[in-house]
Amino acid sequence: MRDTAIFAGGCFWCMVSPFDEQPGIEKVVSGYTGGHTVNPTYEEVLAKTTGHTEAVEITFDPTIISYEELVEIYWNQTDPTDAMGQFQDRGDNYRPVIFVRDENQRKVAEKSKQQLSESGKYKKPIVTVIEAVQPFYPAEEYHQEFYQKNPEKYAQEKKERLDYQQDKERN
């Protein structure tokens, strides 16, 4: 049995590894969703003309890892208080979104978001949106498994993300 989850949380390069390394994950695909253009390119999404956001589509075995667990991993990869990008990645094409494919996923995501809001972990409100799944377009091949293909560039991106997050927490 397989299921899918789609999450947007900034640059998809940094969103793959935390999921890819979990038991029960069959594959994680970087791509684009939430926009109005069919088969957008990276350059088009980067230019902010398509309405798409960078996202990851996760295929998983729910008997090994639950959707609830995936949502928890997601929260730990994003800044859910920042609607206009994630960390050093700024703009609507990097907005945080949980894309749900059915009512069960919506209930899980909304419950988890409510629990996070009530946890006191963040001083600002949780602004991550929950939207219905829209067509998902895989990114170009050179974006797939970026953290494995380009470990130096990935390490730099990840460090910039962590540095940004730490600076933001201090302010």
Image (cartoon, grey):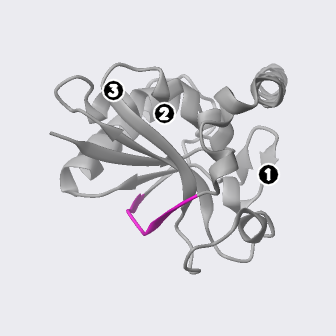
Vertical arrangement, residue 54 with respect to residue 122, above or below: below
- The residue type indicated by label 3 comes to Glu
Where is residue 89? Give x, y as percent. 78, 46
| Label 1, residues with CA under 10 Å away: few <14, some 14-19, many ≥20 | some
- Marks 1 and 3 in Cβ contact (< 8 Å): no
- The residue type indicated by label 1 comes to Arg
Q: Nearer the viewer, residue 126 or 75?
A: 75
> Is any part of residue 167 visible from this angle?
yes
- The numbered dot on residue 67 is none
Label 2 element class: helix
Give the CA separation, mark 1 to mark 2.
Answer: 18 Å
Give the CA separation, mark 1 to mark 3.
Answer: 27 Å
Where is residue 91? Give x, y as percent. 76, 58
Name the magenta segment's main secondary structure. strand
* Residue identifier under label 3: 69
User: In the drawing, does residue 66 fall left or right of residue 143?
Assistant: left
| Image quarter hosting the C terminus | top right
Please tell me in which quadrant of the rendered image residue 166 appears.
top right
> Is any part of residue 82 visible from this angle?
no
Q: Nearer the viewer, residue 77 or 129?
A: 77
Vertical arrangement, residue 48 with respect to residue 146, above or below: below
* Residue identifier under label 2: 74
Label 3 element class: helix
Q: What span is in magenta?
A: 131-138
| Label 3, residues with CA under 10 Å away: few <14, some 14-19, many ≥20 | few
Query: Quick one: label 1 or label 3, which is nearer the N terminus?
Result: 3
Q: Nearer the viewer, residue 108 or 21?
A: 21
Vertical arrangement, residue 100 with respect to residue 75, above or below: below
Query: Quick one: label 3 or label 2, which is nearer the N terminus?
Result: 3
